[in-house]
Amino acid sequence: MEQSAENNIQNKLTDSNQESQETAPNSKKINQKTVFDTKIEFLKGVGGLRAEVLQKELNIRTFGDLLMHLPFRYEDRTQFQKIGLISEEDAAVQLKGRLRNINLWGEGKKKRLEAILEDASGEVKLVWFRGAGWVAKKLKEGHEYIVYGRPNMYGRNFSLAHPEIELHIPLEKEKSYFQPVYHTSEKMKAKGMDSRGISNLMQTLIRQVHKEIEETLPTSIIEKQDLLDRRRAIVHIHFPKNTEWLEKARNRLKFEELFFIQLQLLQLKLVRTDKNQGLIFEKTPTLAKFYKEHLPFELTGAQKRVVKEIHQDVQSGSQMNRLLQGDVGSGKTIVSFLIMLMGIDYEAQSCLMAPTEILAQQHYEGLKGFCDALGLRIDILTGSTRTKARREMLEDLKEGKIHIIVGTHALLEDRVQFQKLGICVIDEQHRFGVAQRAKLWQKNEGFFPHVLVMTATPIPRTLAMTLYGDLDVSIIDELPAGRKPIKTVHKFDAHRLRVFGFMQSQIDLGRQIYLVYPLIEESETLDYKNLEDGYESIRRAFPDVPVSILHGKMKPKDKDFEMQRFAKNETKILVATTVIEVGVNVPNASVMIIENSERFGLSQLHQLRGRVGRGGEQSYCVLMSGYKLSKEGKKRLEVMVRTVNGFEIADEDLKLRGAGDIAGTQQSGAVDLRIADLARDGEILKVAREVAQELLKEDPKLEKEENLPLVITLENIQKAQTINWSRIS
Ligand SMILES: Nc1ncnc2c1ncn2[C@@H]1O[C@H](COP(=O)(O)OP(=O)(O)OP(=O)(O)O)[C@@H](O)[C@H]1O
């Protein structure tokens, strides 16, 4: 059902190239084979067997692929940790010492190799399981080795499992004090391609091809941005003379990587704005009427600004493709309704797609009153809509009798047809793929609906620019007036009784409480047991308080029933799994208690916390945990206690987890960067985007002679992506 984000970005980028092909007359001059297309087996020192391993293990097929297999770190041969001073704080250590007591024992898969590395300050045990026999052959008793790895404490001593190990060659004989370290695998090592082996191949390759390394950027950009030329960047990324050159090389290659992504996304945007016509909604009397007579509160400045921005979009004649980012509780729903009203006077229908039934239901109920007041028809379509009702609804929708339809991905089905779909609002986009978004577009013939993607999951700016770089972005960075910042505390499980006391005092004040348990799929049964035990203990602790329970295994009908009871203030405590994570809105609930909070990611904690603080009362979030916390878990809880700002939290999340992990697995691969790091290279990304914007402004079709390198590179990227694409699909 869900298209992977990897497909998603590939798709996006491939699309952009396809759409831009006709705009690139320069492309006729290219497409010749180069030395970089040469099969890797023809490199001296490789041959058929090694080529096969390289391809299987690292997908290296050509000279070009190997050249872009970049070192992941460098050994500074002047810096070693004293063995006796290894501490638990060390994530990884580089050691130099003499090897003794090499001991290979066990049979077959149980084979194990151990050795002791010692220097003047102490000794440490080295251990290998996989490939033990092969490593053993390489090691010589009494020789000096350089070892790199992660120390682990066993009993009272440290040991290093599967460290990288190399015979120490005295410095004078080395070409550089700076050695590149490449990713390899056990299978590669078995064929003599450990990091040193790869480095040797790289030297051969670079000697052979470095003159052919072509520039990919126009001279004007290189000069203005003070970048290293590509040839030198590649040579120095593999074999840096010193830190300064390494930095320059890195900077150049990071810029290039981010620049080409931005260029493609911006091209896609440009072509779309040029080609895709959207309906024009100029005058908006219904919207004005609603604004004057029915809007229950004054809009915040940010909400007004966004409505204005969008009104400009829908008058432009082009299809709108906009991302609306707003922190939790910032009031996106009402904005989406105002947008949908823009089409009403032009007989355009709207749809609002939510990722879950609970959310769809909530949106529907929230908007129903407004629609009734305006005499508009709104309906809801989800997986659990009954057949007869569905049939009638689909007919009415096709005949244009329904103005707004709210639903889940059931809306994407082909049989859902509109008379004239003018506006699509997609809530929580990251749960839907680009292809799904495109499905909604195709529901009209000859014109495109305007698309507004809403997300409350704080996405770091750098990531948003990469994932949604083809969309315009609006931000609601202001909470409705009168909201008090949520007070957040971290409590250990041992203090539960005090927490119960606090809960009681809040209930006495008339407030409601969420109590959330984590749900991790691998131990689902255990998790449900936790939830049920939690529910029982709450029942015992608060015998007179009505309590609801909500989890993903319940039938939609029952879920809805329990949710409604809580929303209507009939129950005071809602014990739930993370089904309530996104979008649930019960303003009277002012306390969020999160059990095992160390098991949640930062953005998820932020989302959960966002369920409170939605009314005028002071709200609280209590993060429960045991005493034993990982370093990262502790850091996450500290961040939560420190700030309520979603964007700040998102940046911390990115730093802690890395881009691939943000928003779970859905986006892994989507930001598969070779050298740039979105957590650290925000500044380079910003510049790269600006440069790409500037360039397309001056030469939208890349026709200028000096931009030929760009056209060639884009073609090459497209070629590579086509290969990836077919491999994935
Ligand atoms: N300008 C405003 N003044 C006062 N209350 C507002 C305003 N805008 C929205 N609200 C109210 O704030 C609450 C949160 O709004 P909404 O549910 O739209 O938030 P959201 O941005 O969708 O947040 P989330 O992503 O967390 O669901 C709702 O009860 C809504 O009625």
Image: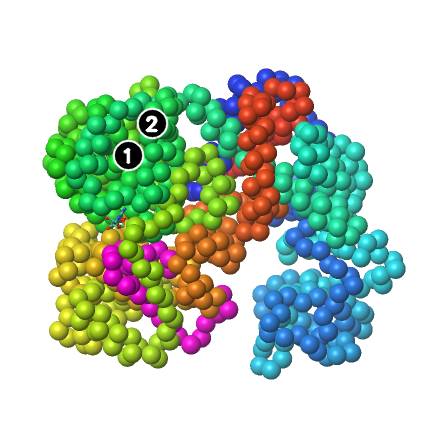
* Residues drawn in magenta: 605-632
Residue 295, percent from left and from top = 20, 41
The residue at the far right in this view is 172
Camera-side residue of 726 and 78: 78
Placement of 26 over or under 536, stated as above or below: above
Camera-side residue of 132 and 560: 560
Report the residue marked by disc 1.
339
Residue 341, percent from left and from top = 23, 32
Camera-side residue of 267 and 84: 267
Q: Residue at x 39, y 47 (%)?
A: 477
Camera-side residue of 58 and 436: 436
Placement of 611 over or under 469, stated as above or below: below
Q: Amino acid at mark 1?
A: Ile
Report the residue marked by disc 2.
314
Instruction: Report crowding for label 1: few under 14, some 14 to 19, many 20 or more residues within 10 A (C-alpha).
Output: many
Which secondary structure lies at badge 1?
helix
Which secondary structure lies at badge 2?
loop
Instruction: Report crowding for label 2: few under 14, some 14 to 19, many 20 or more residues within 10 A (C-alpha).
Output: many
Q: Quadrant of residue 641?
A: bottom left
